[in-house]
Image (spheres, helix red, strand yellow):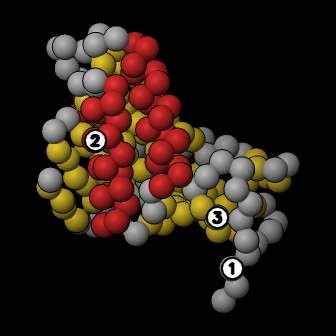
Amino acid sequence: MTGQQDDAVWEASEDGCYVALTHDHLNVQDVMNRVRSPAAGAIVLFAGTTRDNFGGKPVKELQYTSYNKLALRTMLGITKDILAKHGLKGIAMVHRLGTVPIGEESILIAVSSPHRQAAWRAGEEALEECKAKVEVWKREEFEGEEGVWRANRDGAVGERVTG
């Protein structure tokens, strides 16, 4: 496993798995290239973007933070398990940190597989595992309201943090 930290990127890779946390814009082509293989007949890419509303409230932007070292370790564990379970040729998971405006990507997950069915299943499983386990939190900034921190899970209601 390799790990690296600089101002923009934390990353790790091992045996066909690549994970990263970055404050930079996410690049779809770079993430797809991380999993490209001549033995793969399919590459599936998931791009999670900031939408303009949550629970009927207008969202201004999202802000993500993480416990970087632990998050990378968790992400790498998830990708290694999914790679083995689904017989993938490669898997990459990159999460953006900091402010992510409306319409921009906060996460990219790419998987490559000899066949499309395994790639579809693996991509969705990787996203669900990431949302359930990775040490990333988001702050929803609503128009005309104070923001709310919450776990990075669909439907989980945030609690106001004061101070």
Q: Position of residue 124 (x, y in %)?
A: 50, 31
Q: Element type at marker 1?
A: loop
Is residue 46 left or right of 85 when viewed as pictured? right
Specify the quadrant that holds the C terminus.
bottom right
Give the mark nearer the N terminus: 2 vs 1: 2
Is residue 151 left or right of 29 when viewed as pictured? right
CA–CA distance between discs 3 and 2? 27 Å
Q: Quadrant of residue 151?
A: bottom right
Is residue 43 left or right of 63 when viewed as pictured? left
Under mark 2, the amino acid is Lys
Q: Which mark is residue 22?
A: none
Under mark 3, the amino acid is Arg
Above or below: residue 15 compared with residue 60: above
Q: Which residue has dot 3 on it?
A: 150
Q: Element type at marker 3?
A: strand
CA–CA distance between discs 1 and 3? 10 Å
Asked if the residue at tag 1 contacts the one at tag 2, i.e. Cβ–Cβ closer than 8 Å, the answer is no
Residue ID at (48%, 61%): 136
- Is residue 60 among the parts visible in the rendering? no
